[in-house]
Image (cartoon, grey):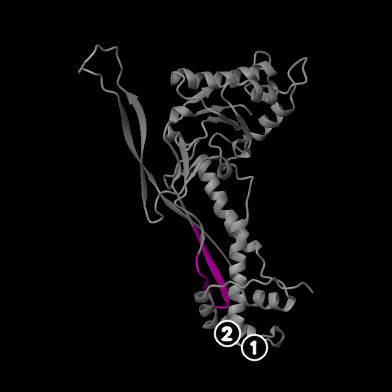
Amino acid sequence: MGTMKKHMHYDAKEAAILRNSAIIDAILASDCTRFDGADAASVFFARELDHVKSQSYDVEYPELTALNLFPISSEADPGAETITYYTYEKTGMAKIIQNYSTDLPRADVNGKPTYAQIKSLGSSYGYSAQEMRASRLAGKSLNTRKAESARFQIDTLTNTIAWKGDAESGLMGVLSEGQSIPLYPITVGATSNKTKWTEKTPDEILADINGMAKQVARVTKNLERPDTLCLPAEAYMDIATRRIDDTSTTVLAFVEQHAPYIKNIISAAELDADSVDTNPYAKPTGGSGVAFLFTNSDKKLSLEIPMPFYQYPLQVKNLDTVIPCEARTAGVIVYYPFSALIAVGVS
């Protein structure tokens, strides 16, 4: 028999809710539970629920790329319904002046206001009286996997919105058309007549990456210098293992060593040609993988999460305890759309 974990913290309100519910009476009706009374039972299970909640906050899911990659902002109040932000364009000029000149030209910044809706994301988990009874009998803590699953579902939805957005709610991701991020036309290979990197030569792949960076530089007069390139998993694996002809250097290593501004190349399965939940250009078959080039700075873009994953006090429904969970997000706000680039068709 396993030993019950000792967890001394508990929510007094949750203990009171349990004490006044039919769940504790149902558990006490079983002789094998070995509680001294309703107070002891309610405090014990309140401690167990507190332990489950704290465990779910510690779980990390590295496969959810957006949550580990994009700058996250929680500056907005959880009670807000919208976030007002500005996209900026520098204006004005400078000129050579004479001593004591008073006609200095005026430089300014034109800001265009935009509004992002904030929406709630919800999930829940819970335990039946029998699950609580069995936990006490076996000497094991309540299963934390239910809470971890609720956390995972909300994080997964947040990750999906960060990439693709949600048209129905008006939330935008980095690949949403409304972001006005420029598209880069991937050229077809000279021999393969394809855009997919797996069917191109190393030189043709390098030309695509160089062309993407050069387009950003050309459009912004070299003001923007994107430093992060996200690739579909297939394209990333290909350049990570494909050697440049007559060398021992892979395409990936060459770019990391020689690209003037790109410092990080990331594999993101969300950009795969069949990742229909996160890639708007994807299809179950015959879709297009996407490369996303951007400057990884909160001055350029941010994933807005005014309220991170939160677990409410338990609710009792018949002989079940239910823990509602919520988070709030406004999707991704892109302040400088020309600091990023989308290239469709790399895989």
Residue for point 65% across, 75% down: 132
User: Does the magenta-highlighted stretch encompass residue 315?
Assistant: yes
Residue for point 71% across, 31% down: 237
Bounds of the magenta segment: 312-326
Q: Is residue 188 visible?
A: no
Q: Is residue 81 visible?
A: yes
Residue linked to disc 1: 36
Residue 124 figure quarter: bottom right
- Outermost residue toward the front? 99
Position of residue 170 relative to residue 207, above or below, is: below
Q: Secondary structure at mark 1?
A: loop
Residue for point 50% across, 69% down: 313
Position of residue 91 relative to residue 332, above or below, is: above
User: Does the magenta-highlighted stretch encompass residue 67?
Assistant: no
Magenta span: chief secondary structure:
strand
Residue 176 at x, y percent in the picture: 47, 36
The quadrant of the image that shows the C terminus is: top right
Residue 271 at x, y percent in the picture: 59, 36
Between 143 and 191, the residue placed more toward the observer is: 143
Residue 136 at x, y percent in the picture: 69, 77
Question: Label 1: how many residues lie within 10 Å, few (<14), some (14-19) or many (20+)?
Answer: few
Q: Secondary structure at mark 2?
A: helix
Q: Are marks 1 and 2 in contact (CB under 8 Å)?
A: yes
- How far apart, in angstroms, are the residues tagged by discs 1 and 2? 8 Å
Query: Mark 2 belongs to which amino acid?
Result: Asp
The quadrant of the image that shows the N terminus is: bottom right
- Outermost residue toward the left? 102
Position of residue 7 relative to residue 266, above or below, is: below
Residue 116 figure quarter: top left
Residue linked to disc 2: 39
